[in-house]
Image (spheres, rainbow, N blue to C red):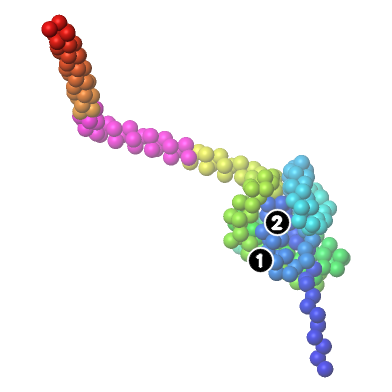
Amino acid sequence: MTLIQPHKEPLTLLHACCGPCTLEPSRLLAADGHTLTVYYANSNIHPDGEYAKRLDTLKTWAVTQDLPVSEGDYDPSNWERTIASALRSHDCAEDDPHEARCRACYRLRFEQSAAFAHAHGYDCLSTTLSVSPYQYTDIIAQELERAAKMWGLEAEFRDFRPNYAEATRRSRELGMYRQNYCGCRFSDGEAKEEREERKRKRQEEKARRAQEKKAWEIAHADELAQVKQRKMDKQAYAEKQARKRKVLRSLRNVDDASLSDTLGAS
Ligand code: SF4
């Protein structure tokens, strides 16, 4: 006799980097039958005030969803050591330094999450990091798989990037705090530089358009002068006609008044 196993909903630990990025993954995974706990393990986040702000945003929202949130150890010194060691030993042929840094960062957070998941009886490990189109999605998939395997878990990797716009819309609608850099001190500096660069490009573009406009005006100066003259002529003609009409109206009033006087006297 074959025993039919009752369907068991997977108990999934969802590693989360922040509230806005958790909105869509938690919705989609729950819809697919995962029983979720959100795990905030992010020693990468700098400074500590930023770490607390993101966690607070996540928790405030999660309470409204009855979604449990656990917090991993926050150990920025360990993160710094891990990244420094990864950068010292990284294989340049394999990853560029930025990729090597992010790989080590994912690895640290996923290993911490997987160890917690194993210790607390979870079946699956997933992450919200793949919502962002600014992350290395393939490396996230590899590192999630690696960490899950180390601890005998299923890796529930999903490419959530198609839901990024919806996550942005929902988080804005909910008034959530939305950070403007990935998390570490490097990314803070890089994001500032990118914003400066975008600003500089916008200013350059604006100056270029103003210059083009000026050059066009110089090249078409005669045409513009003719248009201006025609406009002035038209206006002068309209004013002249208005004056004429006014005089005619007053003459007509004088005639009417004289006629009335004459008729009145007769
Ligand atoms: S940019 Fe983001 S993923 Fe990469 S190391 Fe910094 S915090 Fe980690």
SS at badge 1 = loop
Label drawn at residue 22: 2
Label drawn at residue 158: 1
Above or below 26: residue 2: below
Residue 137: % across, % down: 63, 62
Report which quarter residue 95 is drawn in.
bottom right
Amino acid at pointer 2? Thr
Q: Tell me the magenta residue range.
A: 202-228
Above or below 256: residue 164: below
User: Left or right: where does residue 15 sit relative to residue 199?
Assistant: right
Amino acid at pointer 1? Arg
Above or below 205: residue 239: above
Q: Is residue 41 visible?
A: no
Q: Is residue 265 visible?
A: yes
Residue 5: % across, % down: 81, 83
Report which quarter residue 22 is drawn in.
bottom right
Q: Residue furthest front?
A: 266
Query: In which quadrant is the C terminus drawn?
Result: top left
Residue 164: % across, % down: 61, 56
Q: Nearer the viewer, residue 230 or 222?
A: 230
